[in-house]
Amino acid sequence: MTTTSRPTDPAAARRSLRREIPSAAAVLADERDFTAMRRYASFPFDDHAGYLRQMEILLRTLAGQGVLTTVGLFDPAAYAQYCADRSLDPDRPDSRSRYTAEVARTGATVTYDGEPLTQLLPLLVAEADRQATWDRATALLTRAGRCETCGADLAHAAFTRAGQAVQGLLDALGDGTHHLVCSIAAGDPPLLAVLHAGRGPGARPRLDEHQALIFCTVLAAGLALRTPGGIVSRTTPDPGETAHDPATAASRGAPPPRDTVRGWSLRDAWPHALSAGEVFTAYCTDADSGEPVPPEPGVSYAPGLPVTPPPDHPCHP
């Protein structure tokens, strides 16, 4: 019989146990947030760069000890409100520790895997943006109410319809690597969600479930409230798609296949294909100024592909 040796030294046992207890950190990602925290006398740092260096050393030390650490963003305004709601003194380290634990529990976080903070922080900011988008879209969906005919939850019906629309779009786009952006004119700034999907010949689409959830939620909000919006896709063909194409095989050294951009507008609670000209205009116009921008080299602008809507239902959005 094989037995597992266990540490008999109490210090070694504690170190072993420490590796099984996760840690959390909340980072002041930019200079403005760092400056806001300097008003607290108990905050022990004078410059943002030095603070980030010390944070990275701490994270690397924990990783070297085998400790799993999740990292979130420290928001000074949210921290002040957190302390006010709980009658905590914000100028205390233990209050900051409590808030960090709350961020790890409810906020957007990423797992630290030993990378430099310069690489981690953009990922963390992007994750926080996705979380904020999902929160806004969910709040909008709650306004949909119930169907006057059958009493069904319109938010649920819209989410189901959004899932059907995304599946139809991916089926229509076919093989390749697809980058989809859904934009809904719901406040300032508009709601934006991104979905990356890949598909090989005869295979099911490969996509990130978290991205897909946020994308469908944003799309569902637009469908439920019949808010103006649209979807743009950019497809990069897989290299193998043209490997057996006679025209490609005959032209050694030909440039790689062009990306294709397509678009759809949301009308009648469903994405409807845009013409190639409409796609070009939408893609080559500055969203802020309305001024035209030059078309991107190596990109083709094509009409959106038709996507068949599901059968009408009395409680569809």
Image (cartoon, rainbow, N blue to C red):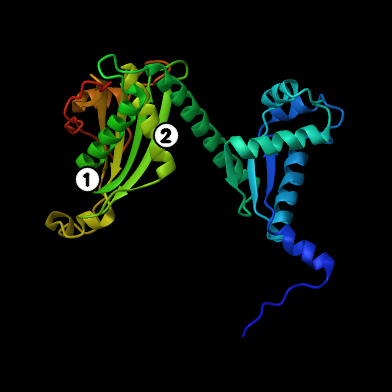
Left or right: 184, with 34 as reference point? left
List x then y, in percent, for residue 20. Answer: 68, 58
> Which residue is depicted at the point 23% across and 19% down?
268
Residue 124 seen anywhere in this rendered image of the structure: yes
- In this view of the protein, which residue sits in the foreground, 131 or 151? 151
In the displayed image of the protein, which residue is found farthest to the left?
246
Q: Which residue is mark 1?
A: 174
Q: Quadrant of residue 152?
A: top left
* Amino acid type, residue under disc 1 in the picture: Gly
The tag earlier along the polypeptide, 2 or 1, is 1
* Amino acid type, residue under disc 2 in the picture: Ile
Picture layout, residue 202 above or below residue 146: below
Q: Which residue is mark 2?
A: 214
In the displayed image of the protein, which residue is found farthest to the front?
150
- In this view of the protein, which residue sits in the foreground, 68 or 20? 20
Which dot, 2 or 1, sits closer to the camera?
2
> Which residue is depicted at the point 26% across and 19% down?
150
> Which residue is depicted at the point 34% across and 36% down?
180
Report, in whole angstroms, how far the alpha carbon at label 2 lies from the one at label 1: 22 Å
Left or right: 311, with 120 as reference point? left
Q: Secondary structure at mark 1?
A: loop
